[in-house]
């Protein structure tokens, strides 16, 4: 049974930084996608950043230049470094791993990030 456990959320002032981490327990066959989504209050879940199996990062336009996604070589953890945070970054952040098998789509439990003065 695969589980994703997130950590690192919290309350931060505008302009501040947070680092989110997501660690997987269990084995996922041929991971090809590791990413972070977020769901702001009253809105739909949206993709924030993702990293391919080859290590290529991709970012949503609204976080480019501020957020950095990284993973370990074993593809068991994925981090999201968030700098220059804005109030509009307030959301529940979820990590997501996808593997080659049809049922290999796993989500973390979500971690709250609140940006407020």
Image (cartoon, rainbow, N blue to C red):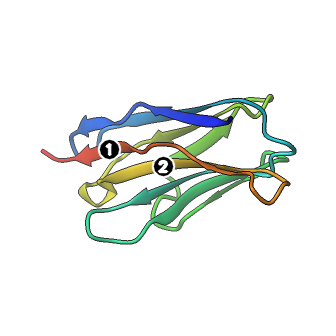
Q: Is residue 93 left or right of residue 51?
A: left
Q: Which structural element holds mark 1?
A: strand
Q: In the depicted view, which residue is nearer to us: 103 or 8?
A: 103
Q: Which structural element holds mark 2?
A: strand
Q: Where the N terminus falls, by quadrant?
A: top right
Q: Horizontal and vertical percent for residue 11?
A: 23, 37
Q: Horizontal and vertical percent for residue 52?
A: 77, 52
Q: Kindly identify the residue that appears in the image at 79 percent across and 50 percent down.
A: 99
Residue 112 vs 59, above or below: the answer is: above
Q: In the depicted view, which residue is nearer to us: 3 or 110?
A: 3
Q: Residues within 10 Å of mark 1 (few under 14, many from 20)?
A: some
Q: Residues within 10 Å of mark 2 (few under 14, many from 20)?
A: many
Residue 112's mark? 1
Q: Where the C terminus falls, by quadrant?
A: top left
Q: Kindly identify the residue that appears in the image at 56 percent across and 44 percent down.
A: 68
**Cα–Cα span, label 2 and label 1:** 9 Å
Corner quadrant of residue 15? top left
Residue 94's mark? 2
Q: Horizontal and vertical percent for residue 78?
A: 63, 37
Q: Earlier in the sequence, mark 2 or mark 1?
A: 2
Q: Kindly identify the residue that appears in the image at 38 percent across and 61 percent down.
A: 39
């Amino acid at each position: 049974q695969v589980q994703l456990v997130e950590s690192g959320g919290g309350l931060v002032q505008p302009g501040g930084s947070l680092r989110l981490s997501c660690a997987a327990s269990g084995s996922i066959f041929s991971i090809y996608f590791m990413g972070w989504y977020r769901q702001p209050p009253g809105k739909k879940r949206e993709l924030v950043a993702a990293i391919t199996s080859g290590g290529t990062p991709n970012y949503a336009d609204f976080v480019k230049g501020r957020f950095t996604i990284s993973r370990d070589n074993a593809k068991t953890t994925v981090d999201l470094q968030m700098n220059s945070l804005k109030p509009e970054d307030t959301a529940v952040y979820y990590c997501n791993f996808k593997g080659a098998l049809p049922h290999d789509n796993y989500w973390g439990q979500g971690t709250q990030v609140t940006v407020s003065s």
